[in-house]
Structures are given as structure tokens and as C-alpha cells.
Image: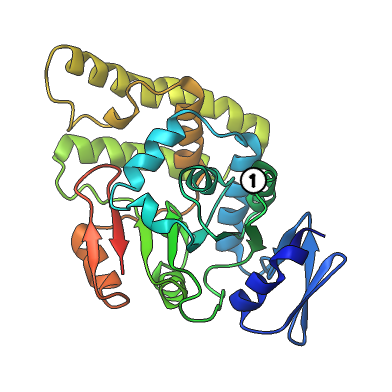
Amino acid sequence: MYYENLQPRLQALFGERVTVGAGSLRVGDKSFPVVDDVIILGEIGAQERAKKRVIESFGREWRHFPGRKAEHVKEFEDYFDLIDLCSLNGKTCADFGCGMGRWSQILLEKAAVDSLVAVDYSDAIFVARDNLRQHRNVIFIKADLETLSLPPNSFDFSFCLGVLHHIPGGIETAARNIARCSRKHLCYLYYDFEDRGRVFRAVFKLADGIRLIVSPIKLEPARRVLSHVLTILAYYPFIAVSALAGKMGLSRARIPLNYYVGYGYERIRQDAYDRFFTPVEYRFSKRQINETFRRLYSEVIVSDNPPFWHFLCY
């Protein structure tokens, strides 16, 4: 059984005696099912309709885009610009809202972490299990970040990239749960275009209006066709203008979607799928980030580099 050699880490993680069984994990007097090495701590309730829509949407996304792209390595380096990866050697880490496990996969290649816990509430956790099958020091948990309760300081380092801003009820509860169990935390939240002009904001409002129209679509073939249409019509014109500006020696910093210059078609399409089919999306200013996370951590360092805003808390 996969978790036999990880039993000491599981006991430290849950703070209780753990017994590994065939298809189950007993923690104290509670028993949790284990499916394909994924520990099921909770399933979405039928009454949680808004959250259910979000969870199902991301589960569909990562089943459709299960593989890591070359561009993900560059993105990882951009997200982790505030982290000395060597400092994570021998540490316990967690990936909250891991999706298909791309950031965990790259971290495990770049740092000799002691163990890593991958958590997701959607069925993407099973995609992450497949992608991380070569690693024997990963614990896979299907759980809701708003109800997840782990012992204080369970992790030396955790990260949650592009997840909290999709929680229907807001970020506070999940952020508090993460802060309780993490000594140091790296987070990414969509920014609210606080330093952008009217044209940039108008483009976003138009895109957000399209998102509100297409996100309720559940039929997967329709989603896939629309993801191609949106990639070509909504992404490529701005990317082309950004590329041209760069070749002319002009700044492209204020052109929407300039981050994707040089990206491959499928990586851009995955982002279009992610951005337009999510039913819930909140955005944050740097001030809001500082106000929220300084209540949970002593220090909050917001990177001045894209993607905006990613920040380190400890």
C-alpha cells in the first residue's frame, strides 16, 4: 500500500494515531476512504450549489488539460521569485488547490523537500496523482480548504496559486485555515487593475461580461470549441500587438495579455478555458492583500513582478 512508508508523516500531519488499511485510512476514531491513493476528507454537498459549480468546472478543466506545458516552468519561476528554493530542502510543504499538480511537480524537481501534501477539492486531485506517480513522498488529499483543519505549523512552507479568488464565499476562511498550519506561505490572487487606465479596464469588463455568459455552459464539447474561439478572438489580437510593440522597441507593459507573448497555442487555450469558464472570480488590490494577510502573518511581501499579485507571508 502506498501510504505504509508515509505513516509517520501522516500521524504528524493529522496529529492523531493513523492506521493505513486497504482502501481506507483511520485517523483516531474516524475512517476516511482512500481512492487511487487519494485520501477523501470530504465531498461537496448538494446544497453548496455555487461551490459545486466552481469545483466541477476546475475538475473538467484539468481532465481536459492534464499535462504540464513547457511554459509552466517559466511561470513557476515567476511565482517563486520571492523564494530561495534551496531553503526548502528537507522541509515539509503543501500545495493548496493543486489542480493537476504542475507546481508540485516542478517544485519536487527543483528542491529536495522532505514531503509534500497536495490538496484539491475537485477531481483534479486524481489527475495530480497520475502526474506525480513517480514521487513517493507526496500525500494526496481531497478536501475543502474552508473546512480543512490541520495542526498548527504542520508545514514549513505552503503555496496556493490562483485558487482563493474562486471561492464563492470569499477568501477569509480558507486563508485563515492555511495560515494556521503553515509557517511560510506563497499566494497568488488576481489583481484589480488598480494601476491600469480606462481602456484596459474596459477590455476587462467586456471579457468579464463574456465570462458571465459562457461560464454556465456544462456541455464539454461546446466548452472545447469555445475555448478555441476565445483563444483566437480574445487572446491572439492582444498578444500579436504586444509582440509587435516589443519588436519595435516599445513598452508593452500596459497592453492586456502581454504576459503570453511567446507562449504556445495550447497553453494559451488552457488559460482561456480557465478564465472564461470559471463561475466565480474576485480581484484584489495590493492594499486589500496587505490588510487581509497582515491579520494572519507578521510579514507580507508583495512582489512587484508579474503575475499580479503574488506575495509571500510569514
- The colour scheme used to paint the residues is rainbow
The local crowd at label 1, few if under 14, some if 14 to 19, many if 20 or more residues have their Cα within 10 Å, is many
Asked whether residue 258 is in view, the answer is yes
Residue at image point 31% right, 22% down: 239
Q: In this picture, is 71 found above or below 184?
A: above
Image-based side of 8 in relation to 76, left or right: right
Nearer-the-camera pick, 59 or 41: 41
Quadrant of the rendering where the C terminus is positioned: bottom left
Does residue 218 appear anywhere in the picture? no
Residue matched to label 1: 132
Quarter of the figure with residue 118 = bottom right
The residue lying toward the viewer, choosing from 105 and 114, is: 114
The image position of residue 9, as x and y in percent, is 63, 70
Residue 167 picture location, percent across and down: 47, 62
Could you say where residue 85 lies in the image, as x and y percent from the top left?
A: 38, 50
Secondary structure of the residue carrying tag 1 is loop
Which percent across, then down, holds residue 152? 47, 81
Q: Is residue 94 above or below residue 26?
A: above
Relative to residue 84, is residue 299 drawn left or right?
left
Q: Residue visible at 69% across and 45% down? A: 133
Which residue type carries mark 1?
Leu
Closest to the observer, 309 or 129 = 129
Q: Quadrant of the N terminus?
A: bottom right
Q: Which of the 4 image quadrants contains residue 134?
A: top right
Taking the image as shown, residue 285 lies to the left or right of residue 86, namely left
> Does residue 129 sit above or below 269 in this rendering?
below
